């Protein structure tokens, strides 16, 4: 039985999560982000109605960059707070959470009681985000889902000097023109993204354990390289892509209980 | 909304009354000296809405937007109404700006650089006094006036009164005392003054004749109510542009209780002591609140911010920095660490003053306030 709903309107995908009385993750749904946020949210809520009947009186908390367009929301909370809430509830401990989203990435230090101690976001540029890989995947004609494994299959890697997505793309074009193979280029690209992320981790200071969330964690090369670069084992929650929406639902649950 | 005349209206009126107008670049300069020559200082913090490509022809891309915009503003006629330009040596970028004006752009108006010492020794005071002497001689030349000691002292007195009034405004609004004494209490009446409006008033000090500023401050104190509501934070940095950032903080549940902004709190100079006017002005600037551009140590800034947080009850600090502002950015890593060790959380956001407020910045500020709440 759904007792609270969390909606995460991200830049690449929109997610909705329902939780039960004890805050367990009981239902979720994801779609690519629709620029008509209001319509998409209405569709999402319709899905909940179909499944659970009325949503009357169920608290809805919105998060993500489109949170302010969720007019049905009881409350709007930033991704930072929501991710911390969701991950803490699932894993049961604090540490450093790295969330790599489609268009922004964040590093959140979570305290022993689930509180946000510090955070940083890469918010102005697509480098260090999923978009960096997405853009270059297209150029290299490799499917996004396969990128990680293709990168890991390369015994060597080339160094990508540009951290900027647009410049990286031109660097790749020139490498291809010089006959460099796709696999080492891909490996270098992953390394470049991971180095950006690791710089963010260092700027807040790594408090172990290291946890990962966001759509990009499906990519095995990112996980492996973060472990290589930080020397820390990475822990994943059960539903890494839904942590923002889950945390939002948990905040909603608390609101509902007054 | 508090009624404040526009900068160009103020300039026009002042000139109609026979005075001259000086365009003054940030941050510290002798206001009273200019007024003793019947010159109105009108400060140029950017400004935000200009076509920056004009300045870009002369400046490297890594020079801050305040300097880029100021040069573009000048090149597009924004400073045509002014009679002289004063460029304090605030940072390398502004010093470079002064040199570009003198050697290459050569505007119609005379340009006066003012070199600021980086320290608080007696020699630094003497250095600044000498700078003011040379500025005095320059102003003598362009105005034909030679104000006497008592005339300058009179102007200093009014400026000091205005600065004291400004402090009072902060104290009433934030319900605290800079001197750590009892907070000033005041009955609430009239409309509540928003943070945005409060800073419009504070920033009117950048261009209003001092007498009008005092009147404005008195009017605001008597006609508005001040409500301290939300999570108290200190805003640090150079300038709150775009000013919508103040609304964003308020909407996210924050209350800017005090600031360490170059255009505002870092110029809450204390009253002077010396009866020698140039020395008095120099001392006021040199012994003002800590400012990295005057060479104050990180430790002094830390102590100042810690003290401000104590007396105001601020729970955190927002560093609102201008991109490529070297002096600010050099200090920040250590300053933030020192604050963190003292249990004062902070967040840093970076802006280009001409850009609209990005939603990512709002998210970052909101998240920070959620953490503090
Ligand atoms: S913002 Fe920084 S770099 Fe730019 S003029 Fe001001 S002090 Fe200088």
Image: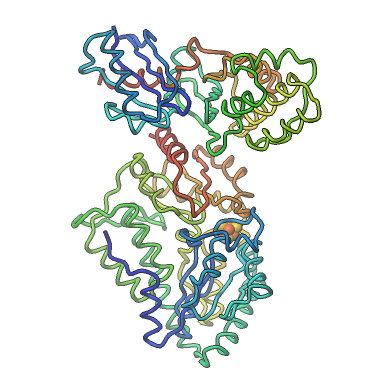
Tell me if B208 is positioned left or right of B262 in this view.
left
**B253, above or below A43, in the image:** below
**A160, above or below B209, in the image:** above
At 73% across and 35% down in the image, what residue appears?
A: A161
Could you tell me which quadrant the N terminus of chain B lies in? bottom left
Occupied quadrant, residue B253: top left
Tell me if A220 is positioned left or right of A158 in this view.
left
Whole-percent x and y of residue A57?
21, 18
Q: How many marks?
A: 0
Q: Quadrant of ligand 1?
A: bottom right
Q: Nearer the viewer, residue B366 or B53?
A: B53
Occupied quadrant, residue B28: bottom right
Whole-percent x and y of residue B69?
54, 61
**Residue B293 visible here:** no
Whole-percent x and y of residue B189?
18, 56
Q: Nearer the viewer, residue A217 or A83?
A: A217
Q: Nearer the viewer, residue B14 or A102?
A: A102
Residue furthest to the left = B189
Tell me if B201 is positioned left or right of B49 in this view.
left
**Residue B306 visible here:** yes
At 39% across and 50% down in the image, what residue appears?
A: B244
**A142, above or below B207, in the image:** above
Could you tell me which quadrant the C terminus of chain B lies in? top left
Tell me if B311 is positioned left or right of B197 in this view.
right
Whole-percent x and y of residue B113?
62, 74
At 73% across and 25% down in the image, what residue appears?
A: A188
């Amino acid at each position: 039985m759904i007792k609270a709903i969390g909606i995460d309107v991200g830049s690449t995908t929109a997610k909705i999560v329902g939780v039960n009385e004890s805050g367990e993750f009981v239902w979720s749904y994801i779609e690519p982000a629709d620029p008509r946020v209001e319509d998409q949210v209405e569709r999402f809520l319709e899905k909940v109605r179909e499944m659970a009947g009325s949503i009357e009186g169920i608290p809805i908390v919105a998060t993500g960059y489109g949170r302010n367009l969720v007019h049905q929301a009881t409350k709007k909370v930033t991704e930072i707070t929501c991710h911390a809430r969701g991950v803490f509830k699932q894993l049961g401990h604090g540490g450093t959470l790295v969330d790599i989203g489609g268009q922004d990435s964040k590093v959140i230090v979570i305290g022993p009681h689930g509180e946000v101690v510090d955070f940083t976001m890469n918010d102005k540029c697509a480098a260090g985000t999923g978009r960096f890989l997405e853009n270059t995947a297209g150029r290299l004609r490799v499917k996004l889902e396969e990128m990680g494994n293709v990168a890991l299959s390369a015994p060597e890697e080339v160094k990508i000097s540009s951290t900027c997505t647009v410049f990286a793309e031109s660097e790749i074009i020139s490498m291809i023109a010089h006959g460099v193979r796709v696999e080492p280029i891909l490996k270098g690209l992953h390394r470049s993204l991971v180095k950006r992320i690791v710089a963010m981790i260092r700027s807040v200071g790594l408090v172990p354990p290291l946890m990962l969330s966001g759509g990009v964690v499906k990519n095995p090369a990112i996980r492996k390289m973060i472990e290589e670069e930080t020397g820390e084992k990475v822990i994943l929650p059960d539903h890494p892509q839904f942590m923002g929406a889950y945390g939002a639902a948990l905040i909603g649950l608390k609101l509902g209980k007054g | 909304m508090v009624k404040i005349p526009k900068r160009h209206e103020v300039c026009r009126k002042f000139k109609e009354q026979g005075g001259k107008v000086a365009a003054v670049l940030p941050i510290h300069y002798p206001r009273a000296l200019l007024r003793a020559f019947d010159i109105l200082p009108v400060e140029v913090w950017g400004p935000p809405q200009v076509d920056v490509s004009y300045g870009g022809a002369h400046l490297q891309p890594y020079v801050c937007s305040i300097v880029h915009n100021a040069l573009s503003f000048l090149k597009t006629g924004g400073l045509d109404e002014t009679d002289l330009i004063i460029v304090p040596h605030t940072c390398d970028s502004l010093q470079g700006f002064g040199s570009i004006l003198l050697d290459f752009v050569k505007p119609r108006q005379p340009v006066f650089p003012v070199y600021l010492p980086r320290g608080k020794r007696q020699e630094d005071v003497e250095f600044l006094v000498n700078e003011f002497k040379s500025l005095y001689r320059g102003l003598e030349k362009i105005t034909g006036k030679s104000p006497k000691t008592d005339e300058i002292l009179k102007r200093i007195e009014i400026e000091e009164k205005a600065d004291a009034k400004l402090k009072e405004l902060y104290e009433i609004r934030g319900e605290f005392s800079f001197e750590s004494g009892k907070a000033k209490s005041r009955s609430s009446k009239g409309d509540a003054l928003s943070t945005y409006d409060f800073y419009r008033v504070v920033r009117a000090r950048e261009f209003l004749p001092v007498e009008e500023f005092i009147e404005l401050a008195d009017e605001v104190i008597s006609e508005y109510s001040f409500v301290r509501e939300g999570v108290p934070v200190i805003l640090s940095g150079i300038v709150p542009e775009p000013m919508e950032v103040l609304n964003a903080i308020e909407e996210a549940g924050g209350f800017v209780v005090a600031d360490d902004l170059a255009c505002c709190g870092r110029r809450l100079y204390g009253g002077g002591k010396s009866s020698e006017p140039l020395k008095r002005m120099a001392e006021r600037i040199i012994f003002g609140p800590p400012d990295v551009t005057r060479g104050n140590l990180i430790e002094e800034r830390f102590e100042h911010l810690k003290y401000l947080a104590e007396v105001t009850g601020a729970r955190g600090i927002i560093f609102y920095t201008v991109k490529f502002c070297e002096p600010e950015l050099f200090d920040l890593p250590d300053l933030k660490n020192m604050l963190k060790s003292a249990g004062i959380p902070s967040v840093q956001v970076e802006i280009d003053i001409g850009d609209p407020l990005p939603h990512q910045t709002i998210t970052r500020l909101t998240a920070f306030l959620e953490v503090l709440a």
